[in-house]
Image (cartoon, grey):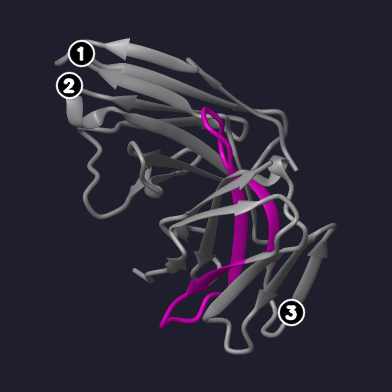
Amino acid sequence: TQLLEQSPQFLSIQEGENLTVYCNSSSVFSSLQWYRQEPGEGPVLLVTVVTGGEVKKLKRLTFQFGDARKDSSLHITAAQTGDTGLYLCAGAEGSNYKLTFGKGTLLTVNP
Amino acid sequence: SAVISQKPSRDICQRGTSLTIQCQVDSQVTMMFWYRQQPGQSLTLIATANQGSEATYESGFVIDKFPISRPNLTFSTLTVSNMSPEDSSIYLCSVVTGSYEQYFGPGTRLTVT
């Protein structure tokens, strides 16, 4: 089983600030997915990255997959209160689609 | 993407009883999974629900405790058997619709007293 280390575990910032969340492993993933989960709801898929070095942008969110496909980062520019939530990274092994999740980053954006 | 619904959305059950959770998808999907999210924790994969055959369980999870059915490509059930307070969790089903993309249902919040 591959392990995903996610950091930081908790992050509290002011509206308008930038932040980066990291997801690291010693193993190689065939793909890596980022989710956001709000209380009482299931995780919502934000992005899937599959190619080493890949960068994807979703409005103010920028996702990067490491060249070796062992790590990923999520950068949020000018955070808004609506960005508050639990951010989860999850990696897939091979082609079986089974996901291993990181422990999550609980982000609080204060007005 | 896919629209996934789960029933019930939440339940409070007594120790020793069983609860069956349903997962319905609005389109046919090949891969369907069941996950558990314990309070304040991340998600852990319970099993892969295989259509027409027995589910494939992850280490630490067994069929007697978590029997799973998958009668067709749009529906699956997970039963939590002989429940104890340690089974209090959110149970989530997920589906894979496209290459590498996995979508989750809203979850079933189970409390065992």
Residue A65, image quadrant = bottom right
Locate the C terminus of chain A by quadrant. Answer: top right
Image location (x, y in percent) of residue A25: 44, 77
* Marked residue nearer the N-terminal end (2 or 1): 1
Q: Residues within 10 Å of mark 1 (few under 14, many from 20)?
A: few
Name the residue rendered at 24%, 45% in the picture: B61
User: Label 1: which residue?
Assistant: B17
Q: Residues within 10 Å of mark 2 (few under 14, many from 20)?
A: some
Q: Regarding mark 1 in the picture, which secondary structure is present there? A: loop
Name the residue rendered at 70%, 79% in the picture: A51
Residue contact between numbered discs 2 and 1, judged by CB atoms under 8 Å: yes
Q: Chain of mark 2?
A: B
Which stretch is magenta? A20-48
User: Label 2: which residue?
Assistant: B82
Q: Is residue A19 above or below residue B98?
A: below
Image location (x, y in percent) of residue A104: 47, 55
Name the residue rendered at 64%, 89% in the picture: A67
* The magenta stretch spans residue A27: yes
Residue contact between numbered discs 3 and 2, judged by CB atoms under 8 Å: no
Q: Regarding mark 2 in the picture, which secondary structure is present there? A: loop
